[in-house]
Image: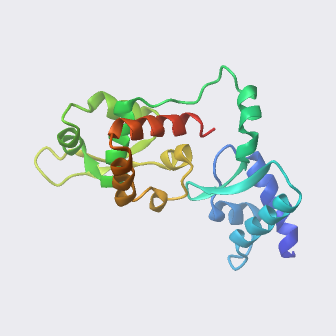
Amino acid sequence: MELHDYSSIVEALLFAADQPVTAGKIRQCIEMDDEIPVQEIVDQLNDYYHQEDRSFFIMEVAGGYQLVTRREFEPYVKKLYVGASRMRLSRAALETLSIIAYKQPVSRPEIDSIRGVNSDSVIRTLLERDLIAVKGREEQPGRPLLYGTSDEFLRYFGLNSLDDLPKLKEIDALMDQSGESDDIDAGLIETDESAD
């Protein structure tokens, strides 16, 4: 089979999937040789979509690939889903999620210490929404659970890996420019709502 023959199969798999599909899963479904690079097939498909001015492209997200709509079509797609709102996160949830994302694996007592308040209910909500996961236990008295982000976290925020998170220096620079952390929080919530 030629490389271009795989393109239609990869496209069909991504079209049918409701979540990101890893390169390994694609190879498994196609029963393709490990030497054939899935990334090259995805790049060819994206080049084709761009040349044909298609309304979508393949995005690397959460360690896999997913068909997504181009940003300029967002207003129209939003109208399709009026009434079906995306999961929204409270300020406490965003705060806790940020701590977990940057310090993982991290225990609840450590999160409580940073936030200055009890985080039990927020952590429970983040677990229910599959944005975080238990990553083990800390080796200390009481052996508290350690938390880290999940693949759903990456997908929700449109990240391919944790390396795509803004660096702490970048966040500090933004906060210095704005002069107020509330402006940054409002921006995060606004970005979150418009990320569909």
Residue closest to the eye, 93 or 11: 93
In the picture provided, is 155 more to the left or to the right than 90? Answer: right
Tell me the quarter of the picture where residue 169 sits.
bottom left
Colour setup of the view: rainbow
The residue furthest left is 141
- Count of residue discs: 0
Give the percent coordinates (x, y) of residue 20: 63, 51
Give the percent coordinates (x, y) of residue 116: 18, 35
Question: Would you place residue 102 above or below residue 116 in this image?
Answer: below
Give the percent coordinates (x, y) of residue 120: 27, 31
Give the percent coordinates (x, y) of residue 2: 87, 76
Please state, as top left, top right, bottom left or bottom right, where the C terminus lies in the image: top right
Q: Is residue 137 visible?
A: yes
Q: Is residue 31 visible?
A: no
Residue closest to the eye, 39 or 174: 174
The residue furthest bottom is 35
Residue closest to the eye, 184 or 164: 184
Question: Would you place residue 74 above or below residue 46 in this image?
Answer: above
Question: Would you place residue 113 above or below residue 28 in this image?
Answer: above
Please name the residue shown 56% across and 47% down the image: 155
Please name the residue shown 53% across and 30% down the image: 87
Please state, as top left, top right, bottom left or bottom right, where the N terminus lies in the image: bottom right
Please name the residue shown 72% across and 50% down the image: 67
